[in-house]
Each structure stands twice: as structure tokens, then as C-alpha cells.
Image (cartoon, helix red, strand yellow):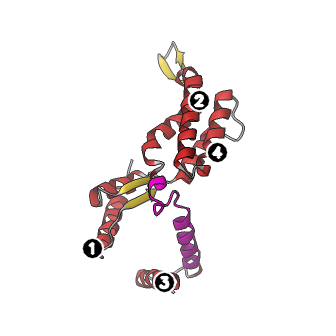
Amino acid sequence: MTDNEWEDELVEDLLNLISLGIKIESITSDGGRNIIRAAKKTCPDAIRQRCLAHIQRECLIWLTQHPKSEAGTGLRRLVRRISAIKTNNDRLAWLQELNLWYDTYKEYINAKSFKEESHAEWYTHKMVRKAYTHIKKVLPDMFHFLENPSIPKTTNALESFFGHLKENITLHRGMSKVHYQNYVQWYLYFRNKEKSE
């Protein structure tokens, strides 16, 4: 389920940036539906780069620290190398290994279990399958940063920036909405001023 209000806020924010003359050429995101929909509505030509840190983190959670299968162990090894991809040659080598992994374990990840009395059917190794299908789904938007070095490959810098902002706001709990908005505006103004000097 998506929260339409949140999507509407993102659309409004993006339109405000565009109205200031900012040309949005790319958006690096965690893949949340709201930001993707908002981007399609406001800047449909922008390149959508998926955050490699989020892809890696989600897949590692599903695969666990100590996978019980050879397939899970092999896929975990590949997932851990995602952040090390820095060139097109790295990408091609990694994709080749991913394809080889799939060819080796496709029967394993497509295996199904069946409960006769309830006629229920499910994928037997669902977490390994989930990690693999997630990678396949996001693959078209994983490596745009290799073609354009100005596209960030993760949202880490942005999350760090806003983490610092949140810490400062926590120190000033109890502000009115007007004071809160002014605080954020001045914070952003002074941070931008620091960067330009």
C-alpha cells in the first residue's frame, strides 16, 4: 500500500525544485514506490539509479549471515561484491558470474513445495529466490553511475546529511511549525553557503 499524501508531497517538492530552474537529470533512490511515481510524474526523462547500498542491504538480510545452502552462500558472495563494482569491466564480470550462478542453481530457486490437503503451493527456498529476483528486477537501474560519474550510486551522502539535520532538530524539540520551517531553511542556507566557500 502506498500513502498518496506522501507521494503528493514528493511531487510538490520536485515541482518546487523544477520551478527554481533546477533540471533533474537523475534520481538515486531506495526504490520506494512513492519516489518512483513522483519522479515519473514530474521528471519522466530523469535517469533512475537504484541505491546499491539498499539493494545490497536487503539481499543480505534475506540471505542471512550464514546461509544454509550452497546456493545462498554463492549468492551472498556475489551480493557482497555489488559495492565494489566501479567500472564497466567490473559490471560485466559480475553479471557473468550472476548468470553462471543462476544457471547452476535455477532448479533450486524454482523448486516448489506443495501441501496436498490444502492445495497450497510455495517456493521452497523463498529467501534465496527473493534475493535473486530482487536483483533481476532492479538490474536495469543498477549501473547508470558507470556511464555518468555525477550520478551517485548510493543515497548514503544524502542520508548522512539528513541524519545530521534530524539530530539538530531533536535538540530543539517543541518548536512551533513556523519555527521548525525557519530552522530547516536557515540550516540548508548555511550548509550550502559552507559548500560554496
Secondary element under disc 4, as helix, strand or loop, is helix
Label 2 to label 3: alpha-carbon separation: 47 Å
Say which label, 3 or 1, has the lower sequence index: 1
Amino acid carrying mark 1 in the image: Ser
- Residue carrying label 3: 196
Secondary element under disc 1, as helix, strand or loop, is helix
Say which label, 1 or 4, has the lower sequence index: 1
Could you tell me residue 63's position as x and y percent? 63, 38
Say which label, 3 or 4, has the lower sequence index: 4
Secondary element under disc 2, as helix, strand or loop, is helix
| Horizontal relation, residue 31 to residue 101: left or right | left
Magenta stretch, main secondary structure, is: helix
Which segment is the magenta one? 145-170
**Pointer 1 with pointer 4, Cβ within 8 A:** no
Please tell me which residue lies in front, 84 or 163: 84
- Residue carrying label 1: 19
**Pointer 2 with pointer 4, Cβ within 8 A:** no
Amino acid carrying mark 3 in the image: Ser
As displayed, is residue 153 above or below residue 128?
Answer: below
- Residue carrying label 2: 101
Residue 185 found in image quarter:
bottom left
Is residue 151 within the magenta segment? Answer: yes
Is residue 175 within the magenta segment? Answer: no
Say which label, 2 or 1, has the lower sequence index: 1
Q: Characterize the local packing of mark 4: few (<14), some (14-19) or many (20 or more) Cα atoms within 10 angstroms.
A: some
Using the image, tell me which numbered label, if any, was put on residue 80. Answer: 4
Could you tell me residue 71's position as x and y percent? 64, 29
Say which label, 2 or 3, has the lower sequence index: 2
Q: Characterize the local packing of mark 3: few (<14), some (14-19) or many (20 or more) Cα atoms within 10 angstroms.
A: few
Q: Nearer the viewer, mark 2 or mark 1?
A: 2
Q: Can the viewer see residue 75?
A: yes
Secondary element under disc 3, as helix, strand or loop, is helix
